[in-house]
Image (cartoon, coloured by chain):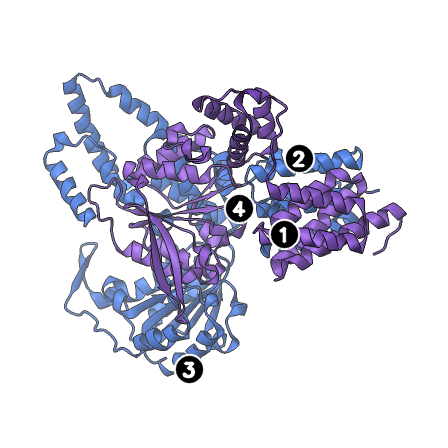
Chain colours: A purple, B blue
Amino acid sequence: MALLVDKHRPRSLEALSYHHDLSERLKALAESGDFPHLLLYGPSGAGKKTRILCLLKALFGPGAEKIKIDSRVFQTTSNRKLEFNIVSSVYHLEITPSDVGNYDRVVVQELLKEVAQTQQVDLSAKQRFKVVVVNEADGLTRDAQSALRRTMEKYSPNLRLILVANSTGGIIAPIRSRTLLVRVAAPTEEEIEGVLTKVGQKERWRVVEGLNKRIARESGRNLRRALLMFEAVYAQNESDKISEKTLIPPPDWEALIEQIAKEIVEEHTPARILQVRAKLYDLLTHCIPPTTIIRTLAFKLIPKIDDPLKPEVVKWGAFYEHRIKMGSKHIFHLEAFVAKFMRISESFAMGMDFD
Amino acid sequence: MASFFDIKARKAAAAEANSSKTPAKPLVDNRLQPWIEKYRPKYLADVTAQSHTTQILARTLQTTNLPHLLFYGPPGTGKTSTILALCHQLFGPLLFKSRVLELNASDERGIGIVRKKVKDFARQQLSQVPTGRDLEIEGKKMAYQDRYPCPPYKVIILDEADSMTQDAQSALRRTMETYSRLTRFCLVCNYVSRIIDPLASRCSKFRFKSLDSANASNRLQEIAQHEGVRVDSDAIEALIRCSEGDLRRAITFLQSAARLVGALAGTGPVVPTKGKRKKEREEEEEEEREAEGGGDKMDIDADEKLRGDTITASSIEEIAGVIPSPTIESLVSAMQSPKSPGTRFQAVERVVRDMVADGWSANQTVAQLYERVVFDETVSDRQKYKIVSIFSEVDKRLIDGADEWMEMLDLCLRISGILTER
């Protein structure tokens, strides 16, 4: 059985349940024959990928849905072999170049040139170009992005790129100026509620409005997360027992971070840091990104502390998050943040500056 | 292949004019071209707002003696266009392929390429100037050489030269001198400081300055007119403001906006060169329709009306990803709210959370907030001096790839702290 997220994913631009004017615009672009390179950006769970799949279908018809997964081997200049997975249909390719880390430039150059130099094989295809969808485009290295620059202009008759990113910040300006920027905002809480109700009806579950409202609020405007939470609630409880007050189980890692927050607010001692260290390691070994840990921890700490301390926590959170990006060992900076938090709250309690 | 078929189909359609009922189709090819390529200046004289450089280069057209060149300046100021236009005027269409080598960062450009590709090209014999072929220009017959000077050297254009490695650049040094009899180099880059000194000293440098708004607006209006897009003056201003002197960006924005307006109306901008044909066709269709009883007439009327949609400043800003001013204002007012620190924190936190969820990029926020706060008269100089240093720190961190949400929140809270402190 497929997850709700996949099962009820809209398959055409008409079926999308919010941002109707954006869908209209994409539809018009797909029909106009003058299809530019696109850069879709927005937070996760806003529906970027769904929109792209719908757009591809609008461009090429149902053939774009028949996908297969290829594994290709690329060779770098230093003769290292790279395995790389490509999801493709007859009309499009989907790649995630950040999979190969620093060697993404090789993949981008070779693959795109190869695609661009061959024309659409299927003469009955609706469009003469192929589409390459590049996931996590903001994770591309600068080299890879500058390699894209000229390719985009040179091969535009045969190739259209759709870049997907969380933010335009990681995209170099020349690429931004060559693409049509499309912002996909996260759905509002009401919109999420509407989707949950609709999905619930389709699944013939009893609709509890209050619960939907709470899920919408707790999801942080992330539709995918909301749907997963929704499914979890219905999977764990008997359908007729679900009411407004049913507990929404938070993900394990979030519960653990909550616990860490509680512990470090309670006691400010080196012994406590040692205890917390084990938990932080636990999170890291379960592949929770350190950025998420530090951000969630900061937001969990904030309701527990006094007003004047709040900006301080954010300040040091941002500071150590930056250090995480620059440094190589994540645990150092996570611990440093914990220690710093203890220090500032201690100095605040005693009414003096330690700095 | 496919375009070949297209032409055939078009001819067939022309032959039996009555059956051509798809008016948009012949226009497709022309519209596919990005406007930045379509309106790339063909002659030196067409290059906008770099009169100093183009004058000097125009003189080299007469003397046909060209030094090595180094063009530098911010993106979208016409560096590549200038050198391409110069080469076209020097060599003409027949010799361009054999006399000009263009390399840029999307081609592999390590030291190996410099050693092989550049050297091989530099070493090649000069291709023959076509003598027998006469060109017909404005009714007069003219020898190819009279029209194009065809000087006895080749040109190697190294676009985006600042992304060449140090090693590759030093490998060029000797090459440049050894083959200087037959070959001229033109390096194009954004930052002259990334070009190693020995290379820079071998070239004559030309700085391309950022476009001033008068020139940019003229060019944009010209293009809009050519494409038959209606643009109001606010929109032109918005274009220039959003593109920060980068003409290429402005033109892309303009095209995207035209697509948006045109696409929503179900038809693209009218291309004037095809205007005559279009008119003929419309007349034909008109006749046809009359024969059918005029049932479709409504259709084309609606078409005409929608095509007239004007591009407005707001649609430009949407494409450029500019945050609407109400959002920025609500952020600023949340930061300045005179209430207790706790509620202020909550207000700022909520606005930032919404902005992140709406997908506004942190860089854009930082830039716009900077404009808003630093040029605010009610903020004292002392506060500004503190605020500016925060901006610098946050910008650096964002460049390093720090989390946008944390940084935005941190920035806003710190500024808020400074603005409200007494």
Mark found first going from the N terminus, 3 or 2: 3
Q: In this view, does A8 lie above or below A52?
A: above
Q: Is mark 3 on a helix, strand or loop?
A: helix
Residue B51, percent from left and from top:
45, 59
Please say if the residues under marks 1 and 3 sit with CB atoms less than 8 Å apart.
no
| In this picture, residue A233 sits left or right of residue B416 | left
Pick the residue in front: B247 or A127: A127
Subunit that carries the residue with mark 1: A
Please say if the residues under marks 4 and 2 sit with CB atoms less than 8 Å apart.
no
Please say if the residues under marks 1 and 4 sit with CB atoms less than 8 Å apart.
no
Q: Residue A282 carries which label?
A: 1
User: Which is closer to the viewer, label 4 or label 3?
Assistant: 4
Q: Which residue shows up at 77% across the image and 36% down it?
A: B342
Residue A63, percent from left and from top:
28, 39
Q: Is residue A61 visible?
A: no
Q: Mark 4 points at which residue?
A: A167
**What is the crowding at mark 1: few (fewer than 14 residues within 10 Å), some, or many (at least 20)?**
some
User: Which is closer to the viewer, label 1 or label 4?
Assistant: 1
Residue A180, percent from left and from top:
43, 43
**What is the crowding at mark 3: few (fewer than 14 residues within 10 Å), some, or many (at least 20)?**
few
Pick the residue in front: B307 or A355: A355
| CA–CA distance in space, label 4 to label 3 | 44 Å
User: Which amino acid type is shown beneath numbered disc 3?
Assistant: Arg
Q: Name the residue under label 3.
A: B174
Q: Is mark 2 on a helix, strand or loop?
A: helix
Query: Does mark 3 fall on the same chain as mark 4?
Result: no
User: Which amino acid type is shown beneath numbered disc 2?
Assistant: Arg
User: Which is closer to the viewer, label 3 or label 2?
Assistant: 2
Q: In which quarter of the image is residue A7?
A: top left
